[in-house]
């Protein structure tokens, strides 16, 4: 199973929005609604941001939103804040009962 | 609150094996699955497998299935990841993470650095 494809970097100004894509296939993102997103700051463990494509765990601000179109999922961060800077990873459940990750996107807040 | 406390850093020689533990608290241990995920230095996340503690059922990616073994001990709410025939490219931070049934990774351990070096 191939990894999901994410852009290596994305950026946005303070207060603006940034959207990260996560492209898979009909065997993972396009087939199942089990797409999740994670935020990771340097030296820290990943933090759960989104599940079931667009559901936020409790405590995650509503500035974070998720969506999906075909084989591609999206994470949008609105009202960018300095603490949103970090690495973002998508994941999907896939055929044959496995999980795959995207390569990660480094978000810079300008 | 959920806490996953992992064992300490390890340094191993190529060809050796390593065991990383993950002690869970703050929730019924049998109520969630446990995944293992690793991250090589400067690299992304790689899924290593999942165990269902109450049954011991496991699933692994094809790339690791001949070298990784996941187990759990219900009596002490602890999951284990064993990796054999270590190579230098196994050098990574190894994380355990829970899955409450949403096919995702909701709570994460702090990570365990495993260094493989001659």
Image (cartoon, coloured by chain):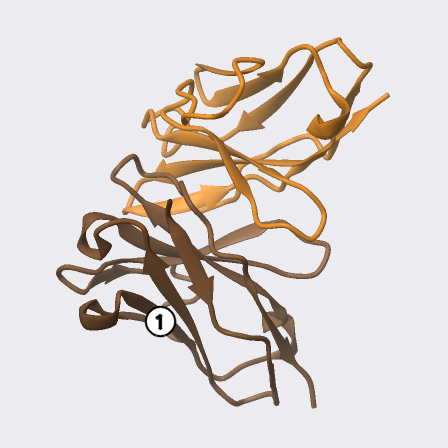
Chain colours: A orange, B brown
Tag 1 residue = B80
Chain for disc number 1? B
* Marker count (numbered): 1
> Is residue A65 left or right of B77 when viewed as pictured?
right
Label 1's element? strand
Residue B10 vertical placement versus A83 (above, below): below
Viewer-proximal residue, A39 or B1? B1
Viewer-proximal residue, A9 or B104? B104
Q: Among all residues in the image, which is located at the extreme right?
A: A110
- Mark 1 crowd level (few <14, some 14–19, many ≥20, 10 Å Cα): many
> Is residue B89 left or right of A93 when viewed as pictured?
right
Residue A74: image x %, image y %? Answer: 54, 19
Q: Quadrant of the C terminus of chain A?
A: top right
Residue A52: image x %, image y %? Answer: 36, 25
Identify the residue at image location x=56%, y=44%: A46
Residue B116 vertical placement versus A21 (above, below): below
Identify the residue at image location x=42%, y=45%: B107
Residue B92: image x %, image y %? Answer: 61, 66
Identify the residue at image location x=69%, y=53%: A43
Residue A44 vertical placement versus B83 (above, below): above
Residue B33: image x %, image y %? Answer: 27, 51
Identify the residue at image location x=70%, y=90%: B118
Image quadrant where residue B52 sits: bottom left
């Amino acid at each position: 199973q191939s990894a999901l494809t994410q852009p290596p970097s994305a950026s946005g100004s303070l207060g603006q929005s940034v959207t990260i894509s996560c492209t898979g296939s009909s065997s993972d993102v396009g087939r199942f609604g089990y797409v999740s997103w994670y935020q990771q700051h340097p030296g820290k463990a990943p933090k759960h941001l989104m599940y079931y494509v667009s559901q936020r765990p409790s405590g995650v601000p509503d500035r974070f939103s998720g969506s999906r179109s075909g084989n591609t999922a999206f994470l949008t961060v609105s009202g960018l804040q300095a603490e949103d800077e970090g690495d973002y990873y998508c994941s999907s459940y896939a055929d044959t009962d496995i999980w795959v990750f995207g390569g990660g996107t480094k978000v810079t807040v300008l | 609150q959920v806490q996953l406390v992992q064992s300490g850093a390890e340094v191993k020689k190529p060809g050796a094996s390593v065991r990383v533990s993950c002690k869970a608290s703050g929730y019924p241990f049998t109520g969630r699955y446990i995944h293992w995920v690793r991250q090589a230095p400067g690299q992304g996340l790689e899924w290593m497998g999942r165990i269902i503690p109450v049954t011991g059922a496991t699933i692994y990616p094809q790339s690791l299935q001949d070298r990784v073994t996941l187990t759990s001990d219900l009596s002490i709410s602890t999951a284990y990841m064993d990796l054999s025939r270590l190579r230098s490219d196994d050098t990574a931070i190894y994380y355990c993470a829970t899955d409450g049934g949403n096919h995702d990774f909701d709570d994460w351990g702090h990570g365990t650095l495993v260094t493989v070096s001659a």
